[in-house]
Image (cartoon, rainbow, N blue to C red):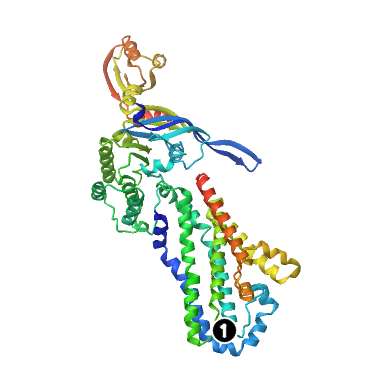
Amino acid sequence: MSSDVILRVDNLTKIYGREIDFRFKKFGREVIGAQEVSFTVYKGEIFGFLGPNGAGKTTTMRAILNYLHIQTGEITVLGFDHKKDYIEIRKKIGYIPGELALYDNFTGAELIKYFNKFRPHKEEFLKELKDTFTVDLTQKVRTLSSGNKKQVGIILALASKPAFLLLDEPTSGLDPLITSRFHRIIKQLKSEGITIFLSSHNLSEVQAVCDRVAIIKDGKIILVEKIEDLKNKFLQNIKIVFSSNNSPNEKDFKSVQSIVSFEKSNNNAYRLKIKENIDELLSWLTGYDVERITIEDASLEEIFLHYYE
Amino acid sequence: MVQVYLKNLLKNWKSGIFPPLLIVMMVPMIAAIWPELHKASEMFEEILNSPAYTAFLGHLGMGDLSTWNGMFYMYCFIWLEMIMVFLVIFFPSRMITTEVDKKTLDMMLSLPIPRWRFLLEKFLVYLTYNLLYPIIILFISYLSTNAMGEQMDYIILTYSLIGIWMLFFALGAVSLLCGALFLESRKALGVSAFVILAMYIIVRIGGMVESLKVLKYFSIFNYMAAGNILESGAFPVVDFFVLLGVGIVALVASLWIFQKRELTY
């Protein structure tokens, strides 16, 4: 399995320093970018990295690229140490930064030509990318909309078919049509064995394309799970209609540990969210007259909000 | 191999070529008015030697202003020095900081090139375009002087122009160091302007006040100055190595700092 490890982040901590309170002339709290972050990304998977703004997604990605000095931790990319072998790593990766900016006085085609000198393109695939995306590559970057600039960035990152793609919110600013084309392309790359690390706060995107996901909160990884397992194992939405003469009260619901939340929708109907163990709920329900029960997997958005609320 | 260099060389050709061409246009202009200037050269020399002018321009030391050689040096090199002050403050200090401001560094540094080399190749573009000043001035001076039937010592002129380029190198490297240290345009520009203008003023004060003469040795502008070369008539080997040393130290420090520093913007 270890030969299949493309990215290993082990105990990464990045503290930017302390806030300074000028009024009282003293240092405030530490500004933490990432704290004891550990996860592994395997060959040929699309790994989602979820979190809201300021959670530590970009810090982690910039640490992987050796842009930041980390306090603790080890990072290996494609088996190379991220500090010592950063040139080797950069020969084999494609990167889209969160705040993508390109040289204004270049056309898209000129940038592609420039990047080709460093990471030679796969000509067939470049042609496919040009056909897939709608941006006019003969236009200077300064004349392009932010969505079109993003398309240029995507072509630059993908054109060499690198072994590993680091994509920081690649679809922000793209319209739905281009986003779906982008998803098709990265699924195609995955099928060819290319590994993709996709940072996003777009949950439906992660749900649509990722195999596994890590959720980061306040600089800490709070969960790494397969998307399917996450939906099945962690949270389910249940609708129960009890018969009118025998329904539980609030205290009864609270006695069931697997019930995360409950609300009454009308007379004897309840909506529940349960976590992990449905057996406990089912055995508890045997004490009541249940008219109807429906069970649905929670959406990734619900799971995400559960962790963030 | 040198992709960053070639890319920047081609992309910045307008800002690289036009300033030297504009400055060099002054040479035929001086040549055109030289016959009239020549008639009033005595009065002109008196004005230029007044304390007010000396304070601003320094001890000219450009030789006899009643000759074409002296007048050419006076106009050409004083103007060049002033343009140089502006260029070295403004361009090398912002070579990296503008990329930080525009956030283009993130994407560009993800390419397989060491940061130090990325910066070095950009600095080499600056040095290449500044090489146009000596080359074009030498060429146009030759044409203008011959057209007027005047005489000029081209060996001394070449030495002086090498001095100009060496000053571009040493001062540019100091300015680049400010950029690498601060990674923020306003700070880098401010510190670079302070350091370079301070050196410019120091060499002027050191040249005017005998008791403060020692000050000028702390200014880069004191080395390979065109006026000194014209006066001595020899290539200032020591000055050359001083500028080379300062330039190399500042350049290596800039590259090392940029390679090692954290990009937290």
Q: Is residue B200 left or right of residue B84?
A: right
On screen, residue B143 above or below A285: below
Residue A237 locus on image (x, y percent): 32, 24
Which residue has dot 1 on it?
B68
Closer to us: A215 or A185? A185
Indicate the secondary structure of the residue bearing disc 1: helix
Corner quadrant of residue A167:
top left
Closer to us: B162 or A289? B162
Closer to us: B125 or A285? B125
Dot 1: within a 10 Å radius of its alpha carbon, few (fewer than 14), some, or many (20 or more) residues?
many
Residue A281 locus on image (x, y percent): 34, 14
Corner quadrant of residue A80:
top left
**Mark 1 — on which chain does it sit?**
B
Q: Is residue A144 left or right of residue B118?
A: left
Corner quadrant of residue B192:
bottom right
Quarter of the image where the C terminus of chain A is located = top left
Q: Is residue B71 visible?
A: yes
On screen, residue B191 above or below A59: below
Amino acid tagged 1: Trp
Residue B113 locus on image (x, y percent): 42, 48
Closer to us: B108 or A287? B108
Identify the residue at image location x=30%, y=26%.
A228
